[in-house]
Image (tube, rainbow, N blue to C red):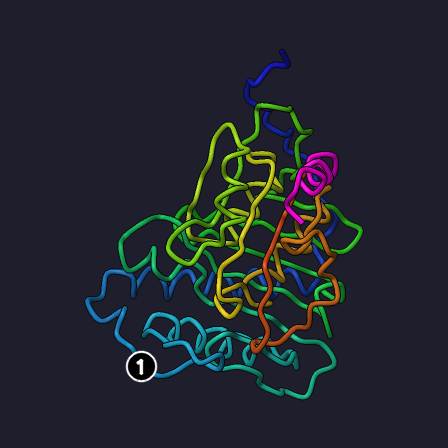
Amino acid sequence: MASLGRPPVPKLVAPPPLRPEIEVLYRVSVAVHRVFRDAASSPHRAEIVAMGADGSPTEQIDRLAESEILRVLDAEGVDWNLISEEIGHVDRGGSRTLVADPIDGSHNVFRNLPFSTVSLALGSTDLSGVDVGLVRDLNLGTTYWAARGEGAWRDGRPLHVRAWVPRGEVLFVNLGVHASERAREFAHRGRRIRSLGCATLESLAVAGGGGDAYFFENTPENRNLRATDIAAVYRILIEAGGGMWDSHGQEIGKFPLTVDQRTSVFAWGDRAFAEAAMHEGLT
């Protein structure tokens, strides 16, 4: 039987020179982290202050984080448009769009669970048009980033998926009352199952070799994921050597950068595992 031991810690190597866009996204993420830290202990952080662009309620902490993103963009002097799950689309006169989830894992925040991020992606039109992705863990302060053709990185260390070891799978699966029957069936094929309630962290675990796949499919379909949830990790996962399909095995690179459409997600590290899962009846 193949060893199930821990993968070696990647060596600290010099990543490619940071693009100016990544430096701006990093500063945006740090500013949001500061707001998050200051607001996370507030008894009002979960108060509903508005309805988001997608029709879901906006909590105070989300609004504060979103406002901070706009403030930093103005301070940085960039003209990027903004798509965020709370405010929707903001036309700032740019040719590129920042797709932001100010707080991914809001329900974890409200229950003091340490699984939440700020997710930032820069691109145009659809997921395949995302050139740069950056995610900051709002509890550990770890920062993940990737740029097209330049690999994926976690605090200066390269990020790589792991090879599939049959019967040794660690799978991240969204479970709960709205999870589809296929999601529950998918969970049965893993040696170990994890469910964190934070799509970015679960996808990043796959990108970094901590898991083999992340599966999210809810019913009804309007409870699935938006571009704001997955745009940044889409680029990071691909640069780390993995891929992202919908739950039926279809490429989702053409999924639009909007807040009014949703998709299921099957993020995988080793294509051999993904194809085996599809062959065995996930489609």
Please state the horizontal and vertical placement of residue 145, each as a whole percent of the image: 63, 52
In the image as oriented, which residue stretches furthest toward the right? 149
* Residue on which the image places disc 1: 49
Residue 106, located in which quarter of the rendered image?
A: bottom left
**The N terminus lies in which quarter of the figure?**
top right
Q: Secondary structure at mark 1?
A: strand
Which secondary structure type mostly characterizes the magenta part of the structure?
helix
* Residue at the image point whose x is 59% and y is 74% from the top: 261
Q: 3 left or right of 124?
A: left
* Residue at the image point whose x is 58% and y is 69% from the top: 262
114, above or below 60, in the image: above
263, above or below 74, in the image: above
67, above or below 128, in the image: below
What kind of residue is marked 1? Answer: Val
Please state the horizontal and vertical placement of residue 124, each as a whole percent of the image: 73, 73
In the image as oriented, which residue stretches furthest toward the left? 43
Q: 241 left or right of 233?
A: right
* Residue at the image point whose x is 54% and y is 50% from the top: 143
Front residue of this view, candidates 273 and 210: 273
Please state the horizontal and vertical placement of residue 70, each as a whole percent of the image: 51, 79
Residue 48, located in which quarter of the rendered image?
A: bottom left
The image shows a total of numbered marks equal to 1
Q: Is residue 277 magenta?
A: yes
Q: Is residue 168 magenta?
A: no
Q: How packed is label 1: few (under 14 Cα within 10 Å), some, or many (20 or more)?
A: some
Front residue of this view, candidates 115 and 134: 115
Q: Which residues are magenta?
A: 270-283
100, above or below 197, in the image: below
Residue 34, located in which quarter of the rendered image?
A: bottom left
Please state the horizontal and vertical placement of residue 271, each as a whole percent of the image: 74, 39
Q: 173 left or right of 129?
A: left
